Image (tube, rainbow, N blue to C red):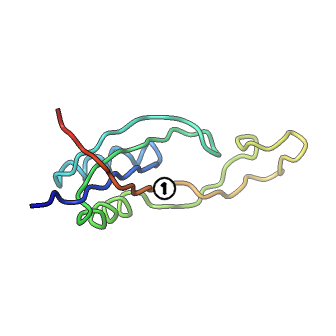
């Protein structure tokens, strides 16, 4: 009997949303590992979550991610944005925050030792 096809999901999301994603995945029996980082446009805390799942479970996991990582807009002071000093807008700028970026990759080989 053939092994089920495995996919690796790499989820990049805001650090404050990542713990909820991890908790929901683990509650439902999906493995998840979180790696904290900073960077991006607003230089805020972010997290990368790695989860290896059967190909048949990818859409279920994506549903959990969509539920927990909602995109929204916020107003941010212009000084907090990476603009050169000469082009700072006078007013706060509306930017998209939250949500997630997800990469789904095929797994050629998976071993647990």
Decide if residue 108 is on the left or right side of residue 73: left
Residue 57 coordinates in the image, percent (x, y): 24, 63
**Residue at the far right in the pictured view:** 86
Residue under the point 18% across and 60% down: 4
Residue linked to disc 1: 101
Q: Secondary structure at mark 1?
A: strand
Please report the residue visible at 58 percent of the width from the left and 60 percent of the height from the top. 73
Looking at the rendered structure, the number of numbered marks drawn on it comes to 1
Q: Position of residue 35 (x, y in %)?
A: 40, 35
> Where is residue 7, by image quadrant?
bottom left
Viewer-side residue, 52 vs 60: 52
| Residue appearing at x 46%, y 48% in the figure | 12
Residue name at image x 49 percent, y 34 percent: 37
Please identify the residue farthest to the top as the structure is shown. 113
Q: Nearer the viewer, residue 9 or 95?
A: 9
Q: Nearer the viewer, residue 28 or 88?
A: 28
* Placement of 25 over or under 33, stated as above or below: below
If the image is split into quadrants, where does the N terminus sit? bottom left
The C terminus - image quarter: top left
The percent coordinates of residue 14 (x first, y second) are: 47, 46
Give the image location of residue 13, x and y in percent: 46, 49
Report the side of 41 relative to 6 (left or right): right
């Amino acid at each position: 009997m053939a092994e089920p096809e495995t996919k690796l999901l790499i989820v990049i999301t805001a650090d404050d949303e990542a713990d909820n994603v991890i908790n929901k995945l683990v509650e439902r029996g999906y493995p998840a590992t979180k790696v904290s980082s900073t960077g991006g446009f607003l230089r805020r805390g972010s997290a990368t979550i790695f989860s290896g799942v059967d190909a048949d479970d990818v859409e279920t996991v994506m549903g959990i991610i969509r539920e927990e990582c909602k995109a929204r807009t916020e107003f941010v002071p212009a000084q907090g944005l990476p603009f050169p000093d000469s082009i700072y807008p006078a007013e706060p700028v509306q930017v998209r925050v939250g949500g997630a970026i997800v990469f789904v990759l095929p797994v050629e080989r998976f071993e647990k030792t």
